[in-house]
Amino acid sequence: MTMNSLTPRYWLMKNEPDEYSIDHALAAPHQTIPWDGVRNYQARNFMRDDMQVGDGVLYWHSSCAEPGIYGIARIAGNLRTDASQFDPASPYFDAKSSPDKPRWLTLDVQALRKVGPISVAALRQYPQLEDMRVLQKGNRLSITPVDARHWDFILGLIDGRA
């Protein structure tokens, strides 16, 4: 599978820190981990249709005491079938998926640096971010697009420019 070549985009990607924290990713070979276990069709479609090598990623820790942005990463590519869907011992096993008709994909994400954390409460303090998807009620999607203006503002916060 190949990644497309559109203008670079920005993403927020949620991961549980017990599975793959930003520290795990930074300690991995080439600071790169497979982003597997995605089991939502819209998130899968973002991976398949919209993400490309070099796209920026806000590395979000979820299902923890303080959800928020913990790192900056980039899409490293290598879009492929997620093998965990075929493993009955995996929490991501999908009995309806088969090797000849796989449902789920994975790709590689490269951690660039640890930040913050920048909590949800901290992000909500800024009117510039009020329409950011992750801050909307009911948003539970593990992968969401991030507007360039939100990306720039958050990097400004991280780098002390905002």
Image (cartoon, rainbow, N blue to C red):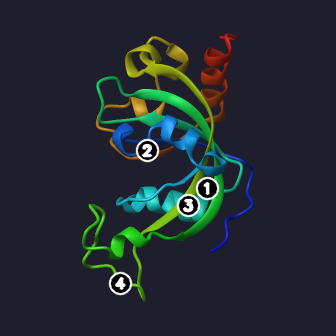
Q: CA distance from mark 4 to mark 1?
A: 24 Å
Asked whether disc 4 touches disc 1, contact meaning CB atoms under 8 Å apart, the reply is no
Secondary element at image label 1: loop
Q: Which residue is mark 4?
A: 98
1 or 3: tag closer to the N-terminus:
1
3 or 2: tag closer to the N-terminus:
2
Asked whether disc 4 touches disc 3, contact meaning CB atoms under 8 Å apart, the reply is no
Asked whether disc 1 touches disc 3, contact meaning CB atoms under 8 Å apart, the reply is yes
Q: Which residue is mark 3?
A: 107
2 or 1: tag closer to the N-terminus:
2
For label 4, count other residues whose C-alpha is less than 10 Å away and answer few (under 14), some (14-19) or many (20+).
few
Which residue does the image show at 42% across and 69% down from the upper left?
A: 104
2 or 4: tag closer to the N-terminus:
2
Type of the residue with mark 3? Leu
4 or 1: tag closer to the N-terminus:
1
Relative depth, front residue between 159 and 145 = 159
Q: Provide residue 22's location: percent of width, then percent of height.
A: 50, 36
Asked whether disc 2 touches disc 4, contact meaning CB atoms under 8 Å apart, the reply is no
Label placed on residue 20? 2
